[in-house]
Amino acid sequence: MQNITPPKAEKQLKKQFADSSAKSAYIHMPFCRKKCSYCAFTSFGALNFIDDYIKKITKEIKYFYDGTPLNTLYIGGGTPSLLEIKYFEKILSLFNFEKPAKLASNKTFPDAVHPKDLLSKDYTDFNANKTSQNNTFTPNDTTQSIDTSIYAPEITVEINPESADINLLSALFKMGVNRLSIGVQSFDDDILKSIGRLHTAKKAKDIIFLAQDIGFENISIDLIYGLPGQKIGVKSSVSADNGSSKLLQTTITQEDSAYWENTLEIAKSLDIAHISLYGLKIEENTLFYKKPPKHLPNDDIQADMYEFAVNFLEPKFSLYEISNFAKTEKFYSKHNLNYWNDGKYYGFGISAAGFLNNIRYQNTKNFKEYMENPLSTKDLSILTPEERLDETIFLGFRKREGINVKKINEKFMIDFDKKYEEIVTKFISTGHIEKTENGYRLTISGILISNLILSEFLC
């Protein structure tokens, strides 16, 4: 890997990124009301700097974004749902987006559109009565909501249950945001409190129901396993009256609510489209690192929790990537698939990373540095062909479909089966890798030791 000293002149840096043709962008919003005990992401509580930060990130986007219509935009954090509606409007106005794959009329549209234009009458019969006089959405409306599947671009915003409300969600929906990623983490109140979350299990469910009422179809939730005091447990009694998740009734007691199965059971009952699961890792610069919590499940129990989740969520949810489950292929995360398919993407904001024209870069994690000059705070590295191959293999094995050997051979001019014969043969014999129609993939047992397996490919 060849490191590039960040140039003093921003024009030199812009030249590095010229004509990138990247169709994905990530934007980092670092603000939080409170830092969760497990969180190692760049975030802090300086909410009074939000307005200034938006001005700086706007400057960065305007300077480096080349105007290529985006297929995905992901606004993450931190807690983006702390932002006022005007800031989302500002950010979305800075980008072009690909036109929808399917239109509701025969009218000819430009190749690039603004997301809010996707809500025009030319695209859908959206009923204007959904907006009341005070510009808020009424969830009891019986008018038909928009089918977000008509959109080509995927526009995701991360939200936390305690900071989202009806005004924000309805405004995001009307702007063209068509995917929500909700940080739930657990449906047990004691566990939520122990890891520093500010919401309750009920609040998380209420926000999901509210988003569904507003019209969001593509809703993902994050869940963490291996949390303090968490156990796999036995199945609790969870039912729904008349098949409606809105009338979810549970008999989970305070004593058994910490069971991992109960959180998964509730998640299955909520009629959401996507679930992301993450095993707890104690990282540096976290509260848990400074003060380790008690009663943590060990690595073996974490592995059992993961395997249990895969079996428990199927067939309603299918595993399509090591940490991600979706109801159907329609709800696979387009943005994350671009990462795993080794695609190009922009990264805007403090600590954000990007990959353009064979250059991997990351913005500074120092807030003061970023605010002083957001244009020249990038650490740049040019990847060698061998490093590009390593990344393609590493990222490809994260997907449930695995790696495509033919594509790898054509891209890197190698014979994969010959180059990696010893490693592949070894892990096929142990049942950790299996052959597919197009190449190889990790088995479920292989996923559990994926770091070990992949380290051998990357040597």
Image (spheres, rainbow, N blue to C red):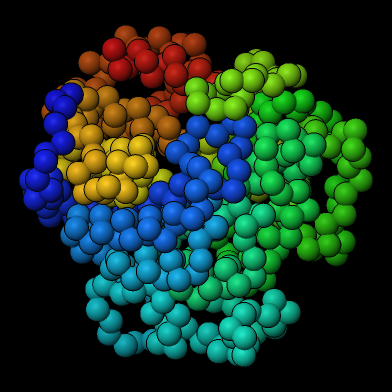
Q: Is residue 411 left or right of residue 182?
A: left
Relative to 72, does residue 170 appear above or below in the rendering? below
Residue sitting nearer the eye, 185 or 300: 185
User: From the viewer's perspective, is residue 73 above or below residue 34?
Assistant: below
Task: List x then y, in percent, for residue 414.
Answer: 16, 24
Residue 308: % across, % down? 69, 29
Q: Quadrant of residue 452?
A: top left
Tell me, yes or no, if residue 435 can be seen here: yes
Q: Is residue 23 left or right of residue 39?
A: left
x and y percentages locating residue 388 in the rendered image: 22, 30
Q: Residue at x 79, y 41 (%)?
A: 189
Quadrant of image for the C terminus: top left
The answer to whether residue 72 shows anywhere in this view is: no
| Residue found at x 60% / y 43% | 34
- 110 or 434: which is nearer to us? 110
- Residue 440 on image: x %, y %: 38, 27
343 relative position to 119: left or right: left
